[in-house]
Structure formats: structure tokens, C-alpha cells
Amino acid sequence: MLSLLKFQNVLEQLLSQSQQKTYLLAVSGGVDSMVLADLFQVSGFNFHIAHINYHLRNEDSNLDQKLVSDFCEKHKIPFHLYEVSENDNQPENSIQNWARELRYRFFREIQDQENLEFLVTAHHLSDQLETFIINLSKASGIRGLSGIPKNENRIIRPLLDFSKEEIYDFANQNQIKFREDKSNQKTDYLRNKIRHNIVPELEKINPDFLNNFSKSINYINQAKDFIIESVDNKIKILKINSSENQVVIDKGKFSEESELIRYEILKRFGFTDENEMQKVLTAQTGSSFFNSGFQLIINRNELIFEEKLEIRSEDLEEVILEIIDNEIVIPENIKKEIQEFGNCFWKIDQSKVQLPLKLRKKQEGDVFFPIGMIGKKKISKFFKDEKLSILAKQKIWLLCDADEQILGVLPFRQDGRFSSDNSETELTLKV
């Protein structure tokens, strides 16, 4: 049961209380964040509150803002407001990802301006369960299954051990005002479907399911810590040499390790797609893989991980792409090269493609099915119709999947077979 003492004990375990801490609380006006704000206020901590009005729910959004601002005014708490406007370029799809990026950017700006050490969010045990189920469906590895971290990157979540029902009970017992977001009752988003359709069924099977899950997630986190330590030791054993920006690993010994260890080592260097592992093991000398932070070069019996290497696109024939929050990430200098020919925003149905996705140059016999046209078309004929010069043709990248299906010619035309009209299986690419 949530209580002031239990909350303070959790916070003390998360952070050393030997010196004064400063906090920024993300408060929406819902029961979770209003209980969090009350707990901090009653505890006498040094904190500010930040609220974002997305103006997505008309007058309800304004009433949420008023509740939070009134609470701050009553208790003399510094209040920071961001109101979303037309200048924020709200997308038609992926609103959740866009909103998340916007709010965390706003929070970090306030932390820097006000010298506030920790960002505090009101994620709770029920959120943890929903996240676990989502990550389980994505085969996200031990880190994904360990759920939402309680303390990471100066973000702390002291309510993660408490259920939604415990938070409601605390609010009612202490007469804490809060507002319900009616959109949470809809099942448009995957998280809401899990919340309203899957979790209740699990609790029917075992009424103590959530408490047992809480114990299990703690065991998984302990296992994660053990695996991280084991991976660190394995890297030391497999490492041939290293420098400030480079680590060289013995490819032969790497291939002899268990699938879990291989996956976790690659993930340590930012390669998160499990399909990449087999490609790394079978890739020929000279092959390269890229993500936002590292380049992996295959050199005979060596795996060379180079940090923040500038990618020279003219030297590449193929680039493996990373996917973050359902967005396909293209290396910045390749993106600039593509933008010489224009911009695009594509929606790709993940259920129709085989990961990992990649960029490659044209090959003899390549064909695709241009969106808006009937039938297939040779890439060479498409280039001719676009009146591209010989030099321009050499710069054009094709987006492909692991089965060599061509998903489009960047930035000119997407393949209509793989376009998406389903937000749940949608990947986006923006250039």
C-alpha cells in the first residue's frame, strides 16, 4: 500500500540523501502525477513542476493546465508551462513519439536553466507491466524485459513499485484533486489495448498477478545486472586491442559465444536488431554496418567497432539502418546527400518487410512498383524518366529489406506494395 513513509524510503534507496537534491516533476494533472506532486510537497523537497498543454483535447487540456498551475500557486512551487502551437509541426501520425520527444526536450531545457538535478516522472507498476508486454512482443532482449528503469540518465521514477489502484487509494484518502484523461479509455493505441483488454484477463487468471509480476521484474533486473557484468568480462576476453574510439574483437571467438552473449555485445555498441547478428557472422571482409553511434567493420577475423565515425557515402555500397521508436534512422551525411534531390515522408508496413532494413546502390535488373503507378518498373528506366545525370545516378540510394525487396527510391518514389495504413505496424522514414 502506498504511503508517505514508503515513498520516502523508496526515494532514499534510489538516491543518496546525504546532500540536498533538486527535482523537476513532470505533472500532467492525472492521478499519478498529482499524487507524485503531493508526496514531494508534503515531504518538503526542493522541486519545480513542468506541464505541457498539447491542446489535443480542447477545453479538457486547458482544465488540466489550470489544475496543475493552481496546485503550484497554492503551494508556492515554481511552475513551467509549454503550450504547443502550430509552429511545433505536429505530425499526422506517430503523435505519441512526437509528443514524447517534445516534452523531454522541454524538461531538459528547464533542468539546464534552473540547475535541477533530477527529472521525476509518475510511471507506476501498471505502466511497467504494459511496457513489459510491449517489449516481450518485440523480442527486445534482457534490457527490454527488465522494463522501465527506476533511475537512469538523471530520470527517477519512485512510483514504479506501486499499482494504479494503490495510487487511486492514496489520492482518495488524502483528498488529492486530479483529472481523468478520457482518451486513455480508447483502444486506438497499443498500450491502451494492453491496459483494457489483456491485463484484465491476466488478473482474472490470477488475482495476485500484478504483485507476482512486481517480484518477477525485480528478479529480471537482477539477472540483467549479472548479464551486463558478464558481457563486460566477455568483451575484455574477446578484445584484441582498443583505443579511445575503437574496440577490436576476435570474430572467431565471438562466433563461439552463446546467442545471448553475442546479441548483448552487439547491443552494447548500438546494434539492436537480432537479424544483424547472423549478417555480422557471415559478412565478408570489408563489409560495414552502421548505427547512430558506431561503425562496425568486418576485417578478416576481426570485428572493429569505431565510435562516431563519419560515414563517407561515396565509399559505401550498403548501409544497415537502425530503427528507433518506429522511425528508420538514416546517417546524417547520407541524409544530406538524399536531400539534394528532395524530401520525403514514407510510411512502411513493418509486417510486410524483413528486418534489418538497409540502403544500397542500384544493381543490374532492379525493379520496383512505384506508388501511384500500375505495375512494376525497372530502376534504370525510372532513372531515365527522372532525367538523372550519370553522376546523379551514382548518388541515389534504394531502401531495401533483408530479403532484397526494394521499398523505394530515395527520395523520389516509394514502392506501393509496402506502404502502411496501419499505425500499429507502421515504420516512418523522414528525409
Image: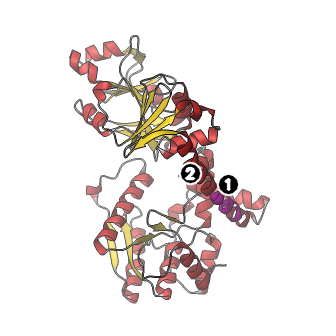
Q: Dot 2, crowdedness within 10 Å: few (<14), some or many (≥20)?
A: few
Disc 1 secondary structure class: helix
Q: Position of residue 198 (x, y in %)?
A: 67, 54
Residue name at image x 59 percent, y 50 percent:
135
The kind of residue tagged 2 is Leu
Q: Is residue 331 left or right of residue 60?
A: left
Against 303, residue 175 (above or below) is below
The dot on residue 190 is 2
The dot on residue 41 is none
On the image, which quarter does residue 76 sit in?
bottom left
Q: Position of residue 399 (x, y in %)?
A: 40, 28
Against 265, residue 55 (above or below) is below
Q: Is residue 47 magenta?
A: no
Viewer-closest of 162 and 322: 322
Disc 2 secondary structure class: helix
Q: Is residue 308 left or right of residue 190?
A: left
The kind of residue tagged 1 is Ile
Residue name at image x 26 percent, y 14 percent:
384
The dot on residue 198 is 1
Q: Which residues are magenta?
A: 215-222
